[in-house]
Structures are given as C-alpha cells and as structure tokens.
Image (tube, rainbow, N blue to C red):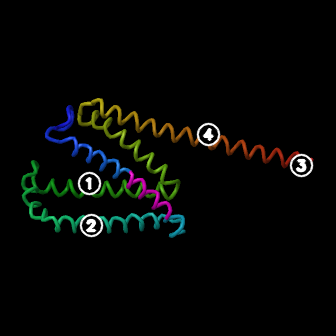
C-alpha cells in the first residue's frame, strides 16, 4: 500500500523508514557538531585557525576514504564513465560541477567548524538551519523554482528555530547582566 500524496511506488514501511533515516541523519549531524566542540575544548586545547583547518582536513580525509571504499565496494565505479558521458552539457562540465561542488562544500564546512570553534556547536547548527531556509528563496529568485507548502513550512520552522535561539540568548544575557549588576551593587553597599 502506497502513501496518498507521497512519492509514487513507495510503501508506507519504506516511507516511514526514510523518515526515520532522515531524523537519524539530522541527529547524527548534531551529535557530530557537539563532538567537534568537545574535542576542541578537551582534546585539542589550542585556539588557532590552523586547528579549525586540521579538524576539517582530517574529517574530510576520513569521509573521502569511506566514500571511495563504498564506491569501489559497491561496484558503482564502473558506471561513472557512462554517467559522465550522459551528462547533458558534456564530460568537462560534469567534472567541473563535481569539483566546484566539492570546493564549495569544503568552504561551507570550514565555516561550520569555525563557528563551533568560535561560538558553539548549537550556534553552528542554528546558522546551518537558517542557511537551509535561504536556499529555497534563492532557488525561487535565481532559478524561478516554484514555492510549495512544504518549502514554506520548512522555512518557517528554520526561522522559528533561529528566533528561539536568539531570544533564549537574549534572556540569558539579560539574566547575566542583572546578576552582575546585583553583585556590583552588593560590593558597593558593603564598602560604604
């Protein structure tokens, strides 16, 4: 039995499994960001930009090794030539698309790791989520993509998450300032 309004040919079980896999991937990504922050604080204990680059380089090397092993282990490497030849613009634009996609993802990843290093893993995750909300807007403006209800809901949830994070930081900062003011007033009153 397929899901009404869902992807055609996908059973309820596969749809549910895909939903759980998506939630799991999101959770693992957040865990990864938190573990990076923990490693910055407890293991590396250096405060330089080179540490950020090292973190990104080493995680990218591991990801590349796993991806290459998966590519060759699955036998999918045999289809790469055909995929490149069937690309509509030709093989050179295909390779350039892959190269520039890799470069832009590396720049994005350095930014994400840098935010973890400078601020926190939570802030990095919130900024990544807000960036996801900007993507559909850019697609509508640049590529004249159609805006549907799912995209609007996803954007609203991303903006809501960012607003909640910002408001909580405002509340925490106000509480901290009030506590500092109370401590200063108490010291001034005890001196008099």
Q: Which mark is residue 101?
A: 1
Which residue, given by chain and number where applicable, does mark 3 sit on?
190
Q: CA distance from mark 2 to mark 1?
A: 18 Å
Q: CA distance from mark 4 to mark 2?
A: 43 Å
Q: Quadrant of residue 172?
A: top right
The magenta-colored residue range is 27-38
Which residue, given by chain and number where applicable, does mark 4 sit on?
171
From the viewer's perspective, is the residue at label 4 or at label 1 nearer? Answer: 4
Q: Position of residue 186 (x, y in %)?
A: 83, 46
Q: Is residue 47 left or right of residue 55?
A: right
Please report the residue visible at 23 percent of the width from the left and 58 percent of the height from the top: 99
Q: Are marks 3 and 2 in contact (CB under 8 Å)?
A: no
* Mark 3 surroundings: few (<14), some (14-19) or many (≥20) residues within 10 A: few
Q: Is residue 162 magenta?
A: no
* For marks 1 and 3 on the same chain, the one whose residue lies earlier in the sequence: 1
Q: Which mark is residue 66?
A: 2
Q: Could you tell me which secondary element the residue under label 1 belongs to?
A: helix
Q: Nearer the viewer, residue 81 or 174?
A: 174
Q: CA distance from mark 1 to mark 3?
A: 63 Å
* For marks 3 and 4 on the same chain, the one whose residue lies earlier in the sequence: 4
From the viewer's perspective, is the residue at label 1 or at label 3 nearer? Answer: 3
């Amino acid at each position: 039995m397929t899901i009404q309004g869902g992807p055609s040919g996908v059973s309820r079980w596969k749809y549910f499994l895909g939903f759980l896999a998506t939630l799991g991937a999101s959770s693992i990504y957040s865990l990864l960001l938190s573990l990076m922050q923990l490693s910055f604080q407890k293991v590396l204990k250096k405060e330089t930009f080179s540490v950020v680059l090292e973190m990104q380089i080493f995680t990218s090397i591991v990801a590349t090794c796993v991806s290459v092993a998966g590519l060759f282990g699955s036998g999918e490497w045999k289809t790469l030539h055909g995929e490149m030849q069937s690309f509509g613009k030709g093989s050179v634009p295909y390779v350039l698309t892959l190269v520039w996609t890799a470069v832009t993802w590396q720049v994005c990843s350095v930014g994400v790791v840098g935010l973890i290093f400078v601020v926190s893993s939570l802030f990095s995750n919130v900024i990544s989520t807000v960036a996801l909300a900007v993507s559909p807007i850019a697609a509508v403006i640049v590529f004249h993509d159609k805006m549907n209800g799912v995209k609007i809901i996803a954007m609203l949830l991303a903006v809501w998450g960012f607003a909640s994070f910002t408001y909580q930081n405002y509340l925490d900062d106000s509480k901290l300032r009030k506590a500092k003011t109370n401590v200063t007033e108490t010291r001034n009153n005890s001196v008099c």
